Image: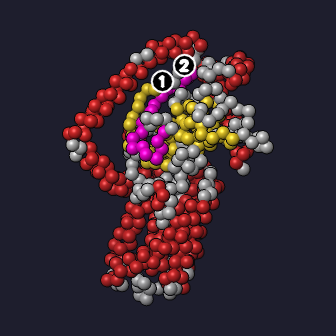
Amino acid sequence: MSSHNAYIQILLSTAIAVLLTIMPLPQLINMGRPDWMLLVVIYWSLNAAFVTGLTYAWCCGLLIDALVGTLIGQHAFIFVLIATLVQRFQFRIRVFPLLHQSIIVCLLIVLYQFMLFWIDGIVGTALSSWLRWLPAVIGALVWPVLVAFLDTSTRNIR
Amino acid sequence: MAIFGSGTRPIIGRGPSLIARFLLFASLSIGLMVSDHRNHYLTSLRGLLSTGVYPIYRLVDAPFSFTHWLRDTLTDRADLRRENSRLTTQVRDLQLSVQTLAAVTAENQRLRELAGATADITKKRLIATIMNVDLDPLRHRVLLNKGQVDGVFKGQSILDAHGVFGQITQVGRYTSEAILISDPEHGIPVRVNRSGLRTIASGTGNLNKLNLPFLTGAADIKVGDLLISSGLGGIFPAGYPVGVVTKMDRNPAETFATVEARPLAKLDSDYEVVLIWYQPPAIEPAVTTAAQPEKSATDTKPKATLDTSTVKHSPTTTNKTKPSQSASSSRSSNKKPTH
């Protein structure tokens, strides 16, 4: 495999995730928008941990903070936390069947949303709406598609 | 699954351990969060970041602004004529209703001068376009295409053609982030147009609903009342429409009545909004009262208590003392019902 190609893949998928994160959607669908950036960070932490490390997750989090206008460091912190968990258990998660992986991803997104909610609560007003947990379900549903897409696109450099 | 070279380069035993690296990044992020929240040290960093991501915003916005431009450019002649005649009619109607306004404004100004009060003076307006970018879906924030280079500042109030829209929360170099009046973190001081009753309308997280949490069952307010901005707090200019009361529920068992309002601004469908620069009233009297604190304090106190019940436009001297009082009292009362 060539590391150079891996970098291109990672950058490209990150760029697409960024665009999908702030792409305008109708209000109804917007509520269930999956956390693309987090999904991509989980994917690369799982499959290319030695290339990305935690630095990648941290930079992605900071980028989201800058884009969405949240507290600087909020997303960065949570992304690093989740990337650490994924890297710690990467050998185990990697061999799970896809359905099993989806459940893990769902739990990770729940953790992510809970941390967002928690930090929001410390800083100001946290909005406790059940809609907050919708992206976790959608994210779990999207995960197999994302894996299929990224696996196909990276097949030639494996 | 694609596994990149886990066989060629060992993961374990290279560099600091995972936990050590996690702790490093975590403490860095927490440090950033604390300094961003507590001391606002990071305004320059935030400005830098928002300038850095500006191309991304533009990229996402581009298809939408392009179709907008295309629609503008490719309208056919009949459409333009129809629109032209509609606008001509509208201008005529508006001019008719404005005819007496100049005289009324002058009279109002003279009366205010007699009473020692000055009105808000709108100095400058700027049309800003809402960029087609979705920020956090749970918070009601929008991105405007005007920033520091256009003179936008934090806390600036935003209107649309129908009423108060929101205020600026963050200013980047070319863009700025605005909070809508319906955001759960936002509150705007309002006055009931009919009765002069003053209160605060806070956002609910629902675009079509504002909440008026500090009204007792005896408050003089009813469904259909117009809420206008009161100008207290010094952020929003006074007298702009905010919302219409849609629900008034007096429950004798509870201290506060349940009052809801619908924002008049088209929060969900606006494309263009107006940023305004205005001069808040009573700048000079504030200096003179500061120079002689004892005298002015005793002078203004009784007047201030009178004004809350009767006078709609308070004289200059009280205008200076009251925003701080009402702001602090509302802020302290703000916490009580919610927690």
The residue drawn where x is 64% and y is 26% is B195
Three-letter residue code for mark 1? Ile
Three-letter residue code for mark 2? Thr
Looking at the rendered structure, the secondary structure element under dot 2 is loop
Q: Is residue A90 left or right of residue A125?
A: left
Residue B121: which numbered mark, if any?
A: 1
* CB-based contact (under 8 Å), mark 2 and mark 1: yes
Residue A42: which numbered mark, if any?
A: none
Query: What is the quadrant of residue B276 in the picture?
Result: top left
Which residue position holds label 2?
B118
Q: Residue furthest bottom?
A: B7
Query: Can residue B50 be seen from the camera position used here?
Result: yes
Q: CA distance from mark 2 to mark 1?
A: 9 Å
Position in image of residue A154 (x %, y %): 35, 80
Query: What is the quadrant of residue A17 in the picture?
Result: bottom left
Q: Are marks 2 and 1 on the same chain?
A: yes
Q: Residues within 10 Å of mark 1 (few under 14, many from 20)?
A: few
The residue drawn where x is 57% and y is 61% is A132
Magenta-tinted stretch: B265-283
The residue drawn where x is 53% and y is 27% is B239
Query: Can residue B275 be seen from the camera position used here?
Result: no
Q: Is residue A35 magenta?
A: no
Instruction: Indicate the chain on which mark 1 is placed.
Output: B
